[in-house]
Amino acid sequence: MDWTDEGLVLSARRHGENSLIVNLLTREQGRHAGLVRGGSSTRSRGIYQPGNLLRAHWRGRLAEHLGAYTCELLHSHAADYLHEPLPLMALSASTAILDTALPERAPFPGLFEKLETLIGGLGQPGWELQYIRWELDLLSELGFGLDLTECAATGSQENLVYVSPRTGRAVSAEAGKDYHDRLLALPEFLREDRAIDISRTVICDGLALTGYFLGRHVMGDTRHGLPAARERLVESIRGDRSL
Amino acid sequence: MAAGAIDRLIQLFARLPGLGPRSARRAVLYLIKRRESLMLPLAQALSDAAAAMKNCDTCGNVDVSNPCSVCADARRDTSLICVVEDVADLWALERTASFNGQYHVLGGTLSALDGIGPEDLLIAGLVTRAGEEKVTEIILATSATVDGQTTAHYVAERLANCDVKISRLAHGVPVGGELDYLDDGTLSAALKARRVI
């Protein structure tokens, strides 16, 4: 059995002295692990950094075996962000979320494209909003999409400012007035197409919204909840003086 | 077939980095043949080192004294602290003989997947040291990996309220490196870290 595909590195763990077990998000095969012999050597270590785009050749005697990868670096995204704290944390968070949340060997071609676009655009103006949209897309791809088009209570499409934590549907200001404390805030950029000012509040509201549903639906079965990398990203954005 | 104490010795040797069962057997046979000249002195040295080894309460280095020989050395510049991930990195920097300040060993890096958080690293001790009046610069010498640099940014964030200059090691073209053979990531980092000559 063998195949060749493009893949983004989600994680690489040491195996023995020189080898790595690398998890890639591939275009056709989904999240797929494989052994890289000599992957932790000085020459190869840089290739298997999270976020890097590789051309991977997988070979195994049987399809259900772990198998072995031979990889060629196509683009080193990790190196692009080593000096930029928040984009680097977002890169770490996105790859860690996928590494924990995605089932193995189930194809998600849409997710591959979206992760590649997200990683390629980190550091560009407004990347924080793109990151939140990416988490919303991830929820949709995994079958837990939020319905932010109309109010769950009245059907109105106007003045949607909340999201129900129970149903994941939007709630208008009028309908949600009495339940304000129990509803999640719906950030303006998710309900308006026009450009808005990026503020820390908007970003934190967005991350709280997606974080809640990721934690509940996607990470609910895992032992640790949301990866620490995402928690650190949220903490750093809260404390970032430039926003 | 080896048995008993020898077999146990082979098993222990096989756990060392770079040694498998076959090379462990070779090493043990080598020692057996040099019982007086090598095996007994090695056993004594291992026992002495295990008994004397201490972790420095100040910097986290491993030495036979606490504070370690680096922290206790009065000739060193106490205004500079170089933050490293591991004792191996401290030894690597010491081999260069180009740094005369003090060190702080974090004990690893933050890890997105392995659940290593700030509380597992010696960051609080570093913040305390950085608050001392004599300290003027902290050099973050973590690896040029996603985890290494995430840790460096996190430490820099924690030190933001301390009145110290925070710097990091340069990333780029290694000495003797030819551009044609460098990977894209290294070249891109080198371009970003270029400086005026």
Image: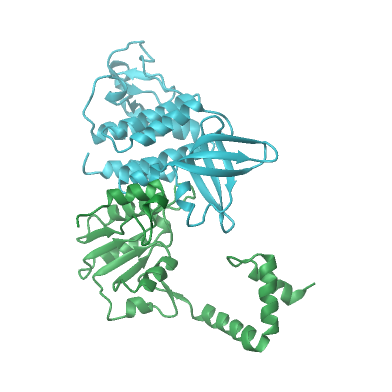
**Picture coordinates of residue A85, whole percent (x, y):** 31, 46
Eyeballing the image, is A190 above or below A128? above
Residue B94, by quadrant, is bottom left
Residue B83, by quadrant, is bottom left
* Residue in front for this viewpoint, A233 or B91: B91
The answer to whether residue A183 shows anywhere in this view is yes
**Picture coordinates of residue A183, whole percent (x, y):** 35, 26
Horizontally, residue A118 falls left or right of residue B6, namely left
Circle count = 0
Q: Which residue is drawn at 37% across and 14% down?
A: A153
Residue B23, by quadrant, is bottom right
* Residue in front for this viewpoint, A120 or B84: A120
Horizontally, residue A144 falls left or right of residue B16, namely left
The answer to whether residue A220 shows anywhere in this view is no
Residue at the farthest right position: B1
* Residue in front for this viewpoint, A94 or B183: B183
Q: Quadrant of the N terminus of chain B?
A: bottom right
Q: Residue at x 63, y 36 (%)?
A: A2
Horizontally, residue B146 falls left or right of residue A238, namely right
Q: Colour of chain B?
A: green
Eyeballing the image, is A170 above or below B194? above
| Chain letter, colour cyan in render | A
**Picture coordinates of residue B129, whole percent (x, y):** 28, 67
Q: In which quarter of the image is the C terminus of chain B?
A: bottom left
Q: Residue at x 46, y 38 (%)?
A: A97
Residue at the farthest bottom position: B36
**Picture coordinates of residue A81, whole percent (x, y):** 34, 44
Eyeballing the image, is A170 above or below A229? above
Eyeballing the image, is B18 above or below A124? below
